Image: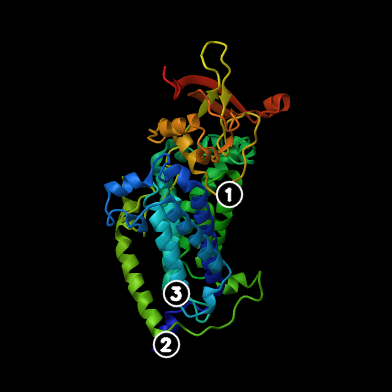
């Protein structure tokens, strides 16, 4: 039995467990803080897309959530701040000092509470990184405590998760858009991505031959390297390092919420203590193998995850590969991938308002400035990731022509000068007062050339396209 338990343990991956548990918990803290700040104006009782509408139309088995018991904005805040506190306790490493069931319970709470939020989050929570965080948190729950060696099976299942994230993303690109196959994707991507960051303009203006090399490097990192995660050491550690470096490159070039951060953290599952010890000599040291009860739990979880892996595995080889799909309402063992198609031009919806009572050719319109999405052509995009600006991201999809069930509600909230919604906006041109009219226009944006920036100081150049929502008011016409 002792030999079996030793084989079931990964005594040479203590550092991997430390990074996985604390890193995933840190992202949970950001995610719950994000919900505490943004959920109420977006999805609260009086939000743009009230969660209560979804709860009334679905049953618990369809959307598992504690909010099926009762929803209120106050309860949402209790859930969000409880998640923040529990996550920070794990980051501090306190549950890891006790028996194996303490970190299991802590991550179980994080997973259950965040699942409750995601499953009622509707459009504003319809992103792959929500499922990725939930699946990562589920696996982290079974990594055990510092009293014993990490369970080898959970570390292998975590590598399987990284494989699906990277290889799935690589396949969806190759299958999805010719620009990934002819290596021209980065001629457009840095400029048209959902939310550029301060360096995106510089990445966009890199020489085109370098852009082609970047795409080749991406294909290597996503289509070849993931297989090496399952190779013997030190090859697996080298593969993990390649993934971490490429994800850091993405962090430098844009705002992608916590997608890149979680992927980097998960890649540590392939790092061995011997390889880490080359940089951090104190890493290492023996730990006793896991206990019989814990081994039984790990065996059951492993079988459970392998069964759930059948559909995602088939999805990878399917010609109709799904991207960012959950095959069960618990967001476990899903399909991942991003940017299967690349937009060639950037269209932005601009919301404007005026305090004028009547409209004529001389009416002066003022723009609402969002925190992350491009607006003022002089403003350099900011870095927000891993924090996620949910309204800004949906505005990007709106510019692509996606239907926005929430958008008319947003315009109404702006006409009402709703305080909660205005907190999601960077600049309110009415300074808290109610406008009499609002409208929405569509503009094409592109990064300024170096010559244009030297001349004007502007980061963007924009061209008017159309008025997409005619002026509307709360006052009787």
Mark identifier at residue 232 = none
Q: Position of residue 106 (x, y in %)?
A: 46, 69
Reading the image, the residue beneath label 3 is 152
Which circle's residue, 1 or 2, is located before the other in the chain?
A: 2
Identify which residue, 139 or 233, lies in the foreground: 139
Q: Quadrant of the N terminus?
A: bottom left
Reading the image, the residue beneath label 2 is 3
Reading the image, the residue beneath label 1 is 251
At 55% from the left and 68% from the top, the residue drawn is: 89
Q: Position of residue 412 (x, y in %)?
A: 44, 31
- Mark 1 and mark 3: Cα distance apart in space: 30 Å
Which circle's residue, 1 or 3, is located before the other in the chain?
A: 3
- Mark 1 and mark 2: Cα distance apart in space: 43 Å
Q: Quadrant of the C terminus?
A: top left
Can you name the residue that lies furthest to the bottom here?
1
Is mark 1 in CB contact (under 8 Å) with mark 2?
no
Identify which residue, 406 or 272, lies in the foreground: 406
Colour mode of the rendering = rainbow
Can you name the residue that lies furthest to the front here?
476
At 44% from the left and 74% from the top, the residue drawn is: 152
Identify which residue, 20 or 55, lies in the foreground: 55
In the image, taking residue 340 as reference, residue 201 lies left or right, namely: right
Task: Answer yes or no: is residue 347 visible.
Answer: no
At 47% from the left and 43% from the top, the residue drawn is: 41
Q: Residues within 10 Å of mark 2 (few under 14, many from 20)?
A: few
Q: Toward which corner of the image does residue 141 lie, by quadrant?
A: bottom left
Task: Answer yes or no: is residue 40 visible.
Answer: yes
In the image, taking residue 327 as reference, residue 97 lies left or right, namely: right
Looking at the image, how many numbered discs can be counted on the residues? 3
């Amino acid at each position: 039995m002792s030999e079996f338990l030793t084989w079931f343990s990964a005594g040479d991956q203590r550092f991997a467990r430390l990074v996985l548990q604390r890193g995933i918990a840190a992202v949970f803290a950001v995610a719950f803080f994000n919900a505490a700040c943004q959920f109420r104006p977006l999805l609260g009782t009086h939000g743009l897309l009230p969660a209560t509408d979804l709860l009334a139309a679905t049953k618990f088995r369809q959307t598992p959530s504690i909010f099926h018991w009762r929803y209120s904005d106050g309860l949402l805040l209790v859930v969000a701040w409880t998640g923040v506190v529990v996550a920070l306790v794990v980051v501090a490493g306190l549950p890891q000092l006790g028996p194996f069931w303490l970190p299991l319970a802590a991550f179980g709470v994080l997973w259950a509470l965040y699942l409750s939020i995601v499953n009622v989050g509707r459009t504003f929570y319809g992103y792959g990184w929500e499922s990725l965080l939930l699946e990562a948190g589920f696996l982290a729950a079974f990594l055990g405590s510092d009293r014993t060696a990490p369970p080898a099976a959970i570390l292998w299942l975590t590598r399987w998760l990284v494989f699906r994230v990277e290889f799935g993303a690589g396949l969806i690109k190759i299958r999805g858009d010719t620009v990934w196959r002819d290596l021209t994707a980065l001629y457009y991507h840095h400029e048209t991505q959902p939310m550029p960051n301060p360096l995106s303009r510089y990445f966009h203006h890199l020489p085109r031959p370098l852009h082609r090399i970047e795409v080749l490097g991406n294909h290597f990192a996503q289509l070849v390297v993931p297989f090496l995660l399952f190779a013997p050491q030190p090859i697996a550690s080298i593969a993990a390092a390649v993934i971490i470096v490429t994800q850091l490159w993405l962090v430098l070039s844009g705002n992608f919420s916590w997608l890149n951060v979680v992927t980097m953290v998960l890649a540590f599952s392939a790092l061995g203590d011997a390889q880490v010890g080359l940089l951090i000599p104190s890493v290492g040291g023996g730990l006793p193998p896991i206990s019989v009860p814990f081994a039984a739990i790990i065996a059951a979880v492993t079988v459970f995850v392998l069964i759930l892996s059948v559909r995602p595995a088939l999805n990878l080889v399917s010609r109709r590969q799904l991207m960012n799909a959950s095959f069960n309402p618990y967001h476990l063992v899903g399909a991942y991938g991003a940017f299967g198609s690349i937009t060639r031009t950037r269209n932005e919806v601009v919301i404007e308002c005026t305090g004028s009572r009547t409209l004529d050719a001389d009416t002066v319109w003022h723009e609402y400035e969002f925190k992350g999405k491009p607006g003022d052509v002089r403003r350099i995009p900011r870095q927000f990731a891993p924090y996620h600006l949910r309204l800004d991201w949906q505005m990007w999809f709106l510019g692509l022509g996606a239907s926005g069930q929430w958008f008319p509600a947003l315009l109404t909230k702006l006409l009402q000068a709703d305080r909660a919604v205005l907190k999601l906006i960077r600049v309110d041109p009415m300074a808290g007062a109610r406008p009499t009219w609002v409208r929405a226009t569509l503009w094409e944006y592109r990064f300024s050339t170096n010559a244009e920036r030297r001349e004007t100081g502007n980061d963007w150049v924009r061209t008017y396209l159309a008025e997409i929502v005619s002026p509307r008011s709360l006052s009787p016409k």
